[in-house]
Image: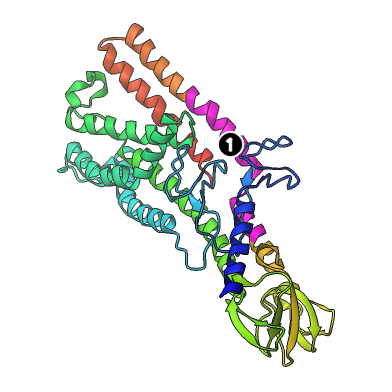
Amino acid sequence: MDSNHCHHQHKKENSQINAGQYTCPMHPEIQQDHPGNCPKCGMALEASVNTLESSNQTEYICPMHPEVVRNKPGDCPKCGMALEPRTVKADSDNAELTNMTRRFWISLVLSIPVFVIAMMNDLAPDLIPKNIPLQQIQWFEFALATPVVLWCGLPFFQRGWASIINRSLNMFTLVSIGIGVAWIYSVIATFLPQLFPPIMQDSNGTVAVYFEAAAVITALVLLGQVLELRARSQTSDAIKLLLELAPKMARVHYDDGSEEDIPLDHVKSGDILRVRPGEKVPVDGVVIEGNSAVDESMVTGEPIPVEKFIDMPLIGATINGTGSLLMRAERVGSDTLLSQIVHMVSEAQRSRAPIQKVVDTVAGYFVPAVLLVAISTLLIWWIWGPEPRLAHAVVNAVAVLIIACPCALGLATP
């Protein structure tokens, strides 16, 4: 009991020490005890964590803004994306991927009819039965596009609003504004066409709508989110497979000759461990008694087992052959080779490609520029435009936002 308590206390102290250190993913030599930016490259410092050691508290980080760290699940205050745990557990589930995938397929099913009908009406009107008035077609487009925009596109509105509140404009700002304005404009044009200038109305008094643009853009951005989340999920699956390689228990050998199975996280450096035939080596260490052949293919890829004798190193999670070994634990917890591999894969999952920094910079200028152009268009047409000035001003400002919205698809590329 006392030994287990000491082991647990030792693990807890290590977790607290590591959790208080911040380092640069590009320059590991940069370390400090508080968050900040790297003095060399300017990247946000990330907290060092123990990958295989358990912790009483899980930290959650934004995949796009590593400086955002919380102690509970939620959304990033800058971009609205779901926060991800720093350490991937073997039984963790990607709820965001499931949610986005569901929204994408629903948006795809509803958007295709809207797009086909809109294109037929514009490019091949003869294919539409003459007895179906244009107003009824617009009602049908409204019925299909509304759930796409308001439900499937809800995460974009939430992230766009968060970006405005936190003054961190990004592509979600432009997407949410573009599809929102397109949908609102189309709803007004469908049900209140008399509010628009006569020049914008056809012979039947109807006004052109943008339901297909709002629906298709929503579906395309959702597709980009699904592809990005699926790529990160595949990396998480690789981490889970690596975590499953580590044994859950280790057999400790005491000085009096007795042996006992203890949890892996209770093992500390210097412990003497027994590795029986067919078992996995619990931690990194060195052979002090016995000889056997160990399968190290999980590390080296070499299928032929390696003979192990006294004073030869052992790698954790490798498989012992037919012999029995006594080993001295040297590297445990986050210091083992397997833990370092898992840590590097996890860091690669959260790391940002250099082009992402360029995209963030472009979005920071592009989004305000589009909004400024739209406001300027509104004011110019309102002051100097033909009568009715307000109607022409609103229509042209909406056109600017709708035209600029697809440009955000480039910024949304996963």
- Give the class, few, some or many, for how many residues have Cα within 10 Å of label 1's Cα (few <14, many ≥20): some
Residue 206, image x, y percentages: 20, 30
Q: Residue at x 26, y 23 (%)?
A: 200
Q: Is residue 358 magenta?
A: yes
In depth, the one of 306 and 184 nearer the eye is 306
Q: Residue at x 42, y 54 (%)?
A: 96
In depth, the one of 119 and 97 nearer the eye is 97
Dot 1 falls on a residue whose secondary structure is: helix
Q: Quadrant of the N terminus?
A: bottom right
Q: Residue at x 17, y 41 (%)?
A: 136
Identity, as a three-letter code, of the amino acid under mark 1:
Val
Q: How has the structure been colored for display? A: rainbow
Tally of numbered discs: 1
Is 348 above or below relative to 158?
below
Majority secondary structure of magenta residues: helix
Using the rendered image of the protein, determine whether residue 314 is visible from the camera's viewpoint.
no
Q: Is residue 76 magenta?
A: no
Is 207 above or below relative to 143?
above
Using the rendered image of the protein, determine whether residue 199 is visible from the camera's viewpoint.
yes
Q: Kindly identify which residue carries mark 1.
A: 359
In depth, the one of 52 and 5 nearer the eye is 5
**Quarter location, residue 161:** top left
Tell me which segment is drawn in magenta.
343-369
Is 308 above or below relative to 73?
below
